[in-house]
Image (cartoon, helix red, strand yellow):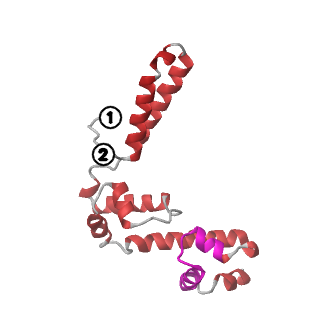
Amino acid sequence: MLNQAYISDTRAPEVRFLVNFLEAIEKSSDDLDRSTSAQSIALDTCASLFSGLLSDRPDPRIQDHPNATVQAAKNVIEKNLDRHDLSPVLIAKILGVSVRTLHRSFSDSDDSLMGFARRRRLQKAHSELVRLGSAAKVSEIAARWNFADSSHFIRQFKSAYGATPAAYLKSK
């Protein structure tokens, strides 16, 4: 149940999509009047779109609790690790907080915002490397997990795991 108002930027893609969908429904209302199955599909789709808008909205209380902001940011990072454009600006936008608030929230934690993202990407890359074994291609794994290049990935991997990816696989 919705117990508060929800305000969103009408230029946001998801809001524009919902508005366009509702306009299309309105234009085809004569056809919908003749088909109960089409009415049901339209209603379910509208409910799903609206529900998606509400479930992705930031909690208005998030700015008041730095630990909540850190945890919410980590959740956003986890969901978006594969995005090449993952950045403090994107994370702050998704959370509905300023970039400054986001960085300030991380100032008391053991990790920086993007340090956490790098570590999680490295962990995912490590898991993939182990899973693929000798069939693993370091350059492909580095690219998939958005490392600048293979050599950057190899340095990060060696720093975290004590060996290059190739040497690490040979030791396993």
Vertical placement of 16 versus 157: above or below? above
- Give me the residue at 34% from left, 50% from top: 58
Of the numbered discs 1 and 2, the one sitting upstream in the chain is 1
Instruction: Give the magenta range.
Output: 139-161
The spot of residue 32 in percent (x, y) is: 50, 18
The spot of residue 166 in percent (x, y) is: 69, 83
Residue 50 shows in the view:
no
Residue 105 shows in the view:
yes
Query: Which circle marks residue 2 in the picture?
Result: 1
Contact? badges 1 and 2 (CB < 8 Å)? no
The spot of residue 121 in percent (x, y) is: 53, 70
Q: Nearer the viewer, mark 1 or mark 2?
A: 2
> Quarter of the image containing the C terminus?
bottom right
State the SS at label 2. Answer: loop
Tell me which amino acid carries mark 2. Answer: Asp
Tell me which amino acid carries mark 1. Answer: Leu
Query: Which circle marks residue 60 in the picture?
Result: none
- Give me the residue at 47% from left, 22% from top: 28
- Residue at the extreme left of the image, as rendered: 64
Query: Which circle marks residue 9 in the picture?
Result: 2
Q: From the viewer's perspective, tell me whether residue 6 is left or right of residue 134.
A: left
Vertical placement of 43 versus 55: above or below? above
Is 140 in the magenta?
yes
- Give me the residue at 48% from left, 61% from top: 78
